[in-house]
Amino acid sequence: MKKDIILCGVGGQGILSIATIIGQAATVSGINLKQAEVHGMSQRGGDVQSNLRLSTEPIWSDLIPQGKADLIISMEPMEALRYLPYLSPDGTIVTSSKPLVNIPNYPDEAALMAELDSMPSVVKLDIENVARELGMPKAANMVLLGMAAPFLDILSVDQLRNAISVIFARKGEAVVEANLKAFDRGVSESQNR
Amino acid sequence: MTKKLLLGDEAVALGAINAGLSGVYAYPGTPSTEITEFIQGDATARARGIHCRWSTNEKTAMEAALGMSYAGKRALVCMKHVGMNVCADAFVNSAITGVNGGLIVLAADDPSMHSSQNEQDSRFYAKFAMVPVFEPSSQQEAYDMMAEAFALSEAQKVPVVMRIVTRLAHSRAAVEVGELADENPLNVSTDQWVLLPGNARRKYVELIGKQPALLEAAENSRFNKVETPSERANLGIIACGIAYNYVKEAVGDGADILKVSQYPLPAAQVKALAGRNDAVIVIEDGQPVVEEMVAGLLGADYRILGRLTGDLPRTGELTPDNVAKALGVPAGPSFEPAKNLAGRPPQLCQGCGHRDVYAALNQVLADYPEHRVFGDIGCYTLGALPPYKSLSSCVDMGASITMAKGAADAGLFPSVAVIGDSTFTHSGMTGLLDAVNDRSNIVVIISDNLTTGMAGGQDSAGTSKYEGICTGLGVDPEHVRVVVPMPKNMEEITRTIREEIEYKGVSVIIPRRECMQTLQRHMREAKKAKEAGK
């Protein structure tokens, strides 16, 4: 069993925290993992992505081949579209629906959403808004991870929750609880869509 | 044995510590930075007092590491690939002096230029200097190789190059970690490393004499291995470093593969592979280094495929897709690229002082249509992009000052250099001295954000010393001006720039304000400290 995931967004949106939590859950459960990150120049408000590969078998390439990603998890809708050639024909896109417009030539939003909706399997949500509603605007990425959890079937929801508790433990109980709440909300949004 | 989830860079760092490292010497540069940062944060390294402070540039780093080796201890030098150019003099000659304590020179190459200005291949440097190379295919090998590379370095008395690429440096995987070895005791060499011509000729012959043993080590290396399928294949695959992973991803166990992770190139194994196949394909990340060597070994009549023949792209990094294609593995179905897509280039952070510098420069220079601004390497290179479009060049560390000088010597006016604080101490100071001695008519802007911003906010070697350095090099103190780059100070900044352009000689303007990234980090740390104190 394998799960190939492209995590993407704009520099500063917190995609590496999502990767860290999935990585922690995979390590604890003994699943093989490779995770290629982008550091350096591309972090400055530009597009960022991470290739995350999970498998019960040995993993060779650090990069996901085209057409093989089971999941695209994106903090930004146009960034989700950037990696379409990597998505498997029966893969799923889990994305924030809220554009981050920091370039002058951002595409027409209606056309962008229509293209996103034309994909076979898409889950999208204004995660920033949900996180704000919950009173924890910084936990939008945990809402997104929760939305992706039902599709991450190589790891259980409980394994991901445990990983959140471990990763945020040093920031105190309140931060752990807030992030778990955001994650749980994402899970239910995804299951009830 | 414990398992740890490590970046390739971190695997190198931990491998070095556990192999008895006594000092790492480095200048920050993507994708090598995390090696030194890991050692700086490691409890064992701290307890042992392992040297890990950043060096001013790669040359000072290489020389200091060679000095530590002379004293008998194990030293590691880390840099991005272009750092090899900066330390080349010391590096090439360290092969001739030889080493005492083990010396590893780690070069992190950046094929596809994710964060670099070229994709030069450090294996060429190793061949040129006639020293061995280790090229790991995985994080585990990166860890394991460090102890073996130190041992080989000490056994053969040569520096050893460890070559990694971005995709290994910045990819995480589980690594089985071994025991911690002791450091070498202080054991200062009694040999003379004096490369006067008479000695150098003798030492060079010694280096050449080591080559058969280095080749034998590579032929017998556990990191070089042959995988032969049960049935005869007709295409032999030479897979170097991480190329091996892409080959395995594409063809699994059904191919005749020579995995190369230690050099000199194991020539006997290459010939054996060629002998049992009709053709050989060379798959290597970076430039066609091995492909050229193999052509030399097998002769003009043998069919060799690779980057030079167009079977793999001539430029850019390997991917599982271009390797599969080169091996004739058909691509599966996939979606077309999206239609509603725009590039999202990196940008200067909101509130960054470099922004104010470019805003002010552009405002003043609008009155001087003949002007040129020579840029340098750092976040502020982004001033070349919209909305500022201020820069005419960015070539190598420090080139802003010397190129501005040369252009001014030729008659360009105004000739302006923009350089960051860390880049200035890395390679700008000597150029400024040239300009002072020539009384060149240039304006040098040292945009000081108190850190090495681009690589992630490491300490900058010259912090709080810039005015002293510039006046010490002979810049007239009246023309070393400090401003605070903020929108509210725009009138003062533009007036200062205008005055210094009109001054016929070398001027230095230092706009100084902390990097937004490190400022936010320092504020978070202060808040945490305050909360802890409650």
Image: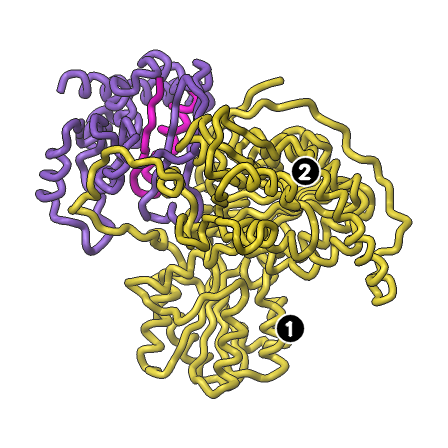
Which residues are drawn in magenta? A1-25
Task: Say what amino acid the circle numbered 2 marks.
Answer: Glu
From the viewer's perspective, is B132 left or right of B274?
Answer: right
Q: Is residue B27 visible?
A: no
| Image position, residue A112 (x, y; %) | 13, 42
- Kindly state the secondary structure of the residue where label 2 is placed: helix
Q: Quadrant of the N terminus of chain A?
A: top left
Residue toward you, A153 or A165: A153
| Image position, residue B319 (x, y; %) | 39, 41
Chain drawn yellow, letter?
B
Chain of residue at mark 1: B
3D distance between C-alphas at marks 1 and 2: 52 Å
Q: Residues within 10 Å of mark 1 (few under 14, many from 20)?
A: some
Q: Residue B219's mark?
A: 2
Extreme-right residue of the structure: B190
Q: Is residue B505 visible?
A: yes
- Kindly state the secondary structure of the residue where label 1 is placed: loop
The residue carrying mark 1 is B473
Chain drawn purple, letter?
A
Residue toward you, B250 or A154: B250
What residue is rendered at 46% in x and 19% in y? A27
